[in-house]
Image (cartoon, coloured by chain):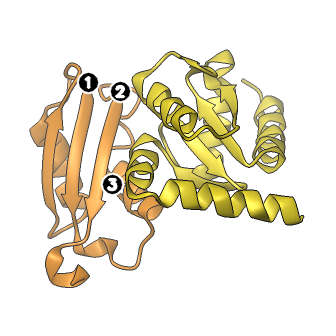
Chain colours: A orange, B yellow
Amino acid sequence: MVSTDEVRRRIEAALPGARVEVGTFQGLDHFEAVVEAPQFAGKSRVEQHQMVYAAVSDLLGGAMHALSLKTRLPESISG
Amino acid sequence: MTTDSMDQWAEQIKKDIAGSTIFVYAKGEKNMAACGFSHRVMEILNRLGVDYQVRNVLVDPVIRQAVSAHTQWPTIPQVFIGGKFVGGCDIVTEMYESGELQQTIEQAGQETAKA
């Protein structure tokens, strides 16, 4: 079992300065996260998701059945 | 698992995604998904009324490994349009809602028709 806090900490550690919200749905092994990170600048959506997946790659398929993602740039950069 | 079957699947994946405008690696067969995320992707494509092919990764665990190695993407489903990896369930859903998916499919269809 992995907690939403642990998942949030992992993503924050991989993407310093990111704003991360993590929740679960359909039981405790389906996670969803909204990640807003300055590191996403200039990256495609696929690349942005890959950056988040990389932070939790060892959990996926194990304690984490799924990680549903929404990624975006902080408004200060995207505007 | 042998390196051989990994190589064979890597080759097959190239053929799969080059062979049809829309190709989906899913858990389950076409219209018989074994996972909610694979189901959602197929449902979106059905709603658009477009033609697509599906390969069930549950048939052989090596397929999933080979697909993920190809895309550097850890989860299933994975959707390819015009031979290019566009994303998993979240991205396809976002693209569908914004109308970008329909556009991408149309463009890929036109390119296939020209070729």
The residue wearing badge 1 is: A29
Q: Which residue is mark 3?
A: A52
Residue at image location 44% in from the left, 40% down from the top: B89
- Give the position of the C terminus of chain A as an image quadrant: bottom left
Q: Are marks 1 and 2 in contact (CB under 8 Å)?
A: yes
Subunit of mark 3? Answer: A
Residue at the extreme left of the image, as rendered: A5
Q: CA distance from mark 3 to mark 2?
A: 15 Å
User: x, y percentage for residue A12?
Assistant: 17, 58
Kindly identify the residue that appears in the image at 29 percent across and 59 percent down: A71
Left or right: A6, with A26 as reference point: left
Q: Label 2 crowding class (10 Å Cα cut-off): few <14, some 14-19, many 20+? A: some
Judge the density around disc 1: few (<14), some (14-19), many (≥20) Cα neighbours within 10 Å.
many
Give whichever of A33, A52 is nearer the camera. Answer: A33
**Does dot 1 land on a helix, a strand or a loop?**
loop
Chain under disc 2: A
Residue B76, visible in the rendered structure: no
Mark 2 residue type:
His
> Helix or strand or loop: what does disc 2 sit on?
loop
Is residue A18 left or right of A39 when viewed as pictured?
A: left
The kind of residue on which mark 1 rests is Asp
Q: Are marks 1 and 2 on the same chain?
A: yes
Q: Nearer the viewer, residue A57 or A33?
A: A33
Q: Earlier in the sequence, mark 3 or mark 2?
A: 3
Q: Which residue type carries mark 3?
A: Val
- Residue located beneath label 2 in the image: A65
Q: To which chain does the residue with label 1 belong? A: A
Mark 3 and mark 2 residues within 8 Å of each other at the beta carbon: no
Whether label 1 touches label 3, CB < 8 Å:
no
